[in-house]
Amino acid sequence: MLFRFEKEGSDETPRNVVTLLSFRIMPMISFYCANVNTFLMLYSFEYTLGMKYAAMIRGIGPTNPNMKGAKLAEAFESCGFNNVRPFLASGNVLFESDITDTGELERMAEAALPRLLGFSREVFICSADDLQRIVDIAPFGERKHENSGKTYLTVTFFKTPTKDLLEVPPLALPYKPEGKAFELVANVNGALCCVVDLEHGKTPDLMQWLERQYGKHITTRTWSTLTRMLAKLQT
């Protein structure tokens, strides 16, 4: 029995109530509140620990059995990454990790590919936050990505981003090379956004020009693929 009241009219009754609140009830309330807070903190920590990433692998051919999405996912899982999911057939893998250094993540993935799948490829990794920043800037304005329409929107990622892409060579964006049916419209955090006019040119023309200008340590995804990857990461 936690407490007892004295006989009616006794001046001890208030004292017993105060004693009960001070030495029994309040410590119990504090104990349970502390444990609830601890649980909530642990729960929050567990589910926010892993950052979300999109990996883009250069030069993936869907006809190679070891380049299928399921095989790529196995290689990424071997690195200890969580919630690994292949995305489309162009060499994209979505995953989570508590490692915040994208360079380290890229090295881990690039080491796993030859070890488990027998081929070497460059891997470009962006966090969901990085992709969101690109989308938020809306580098293409009102233009729309149309596979069979008039415009084809692309975003090119660089393995070793220069301090300023415009220095290699010096360009003022937007920039349209003479005689070409594509335009470089924006440099967003080291990612180069381009538009191809499909009525007068083809996407391979842009890819070849980019490789001549910046080398082969790059990979390109369509604006549609990028925004869909981001939406998938957010689910």
Image (tube, helix red, strand yellow):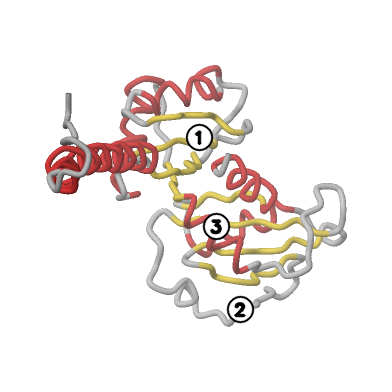
Q: Position of residue 192 (x, y in %)?
A: 56, 64
Mark 3 residue element? helix
Q: Relative to residue 108, is residue 54 drawn left or right?
A: right
Q: Position of residue 136 (x, y in %)?
A: 60, 65
Above or below for 140 versus 15: below
Separation (CA) of disc 2 from disc 1: 31 Å
Q: In this orientation, which residue lies closer to the viewer: 199 or 133?
A: 133
Q: Relative to residue 127, is residue 234 drawn left or right?
A: right
Q: Quadrant of residue 142?
A: bottom right
Give the total number of marks visible in the rendering: 3
User: Please, what is the three-letter code of the amino acid marked with disc 2?
Assistant: Leu
Q: Position of residue 68 (x, y in %)?
A: 56, 22
Q: Residues within 10 Å of mark 2 (few under 14, many from 20)?
A: few
User: Please, what is the three-letter code of the amino acid marked with disc 3?
Assistant: Gln
Residue at 58 percent across and 29 percent down: it is: 61
Q: Position of residue 216 (x, y in %)?
A: 48, 51
Q: Earlier in the sequence, mark 2 or mark 3?
A: 3
Separation (CA) of disc 1 from disc 3: 17 Å
Quarter the C terminus occupies: top right
Above or below for 36 versus 84: below
Q: In this orientation, which residue lies closer to the viewer: 36 or 72?
A: 36
In the drawing, what numbered circle is on residue 14? none
Q: In this orientation, which residue lies closer to the viewer: 39 or 140?
A: 39
Q: Relative to residue 36, is residue 51 drawn left or right?
A: right
Q: Nearer the viewer, mark 2 or mark 3?
A: 3
Separation (CA) of disc 2 from disc 3: 22 Å
In the drawing, what numbered circle is on residue 93? 1
In the drawing, what numbered circle is on residue 132? 3
Which residue is identified by label 2?
Answer: 173
Q: In this orientation, which residue lies closer to the viewer: 191 or 98?
A: 98
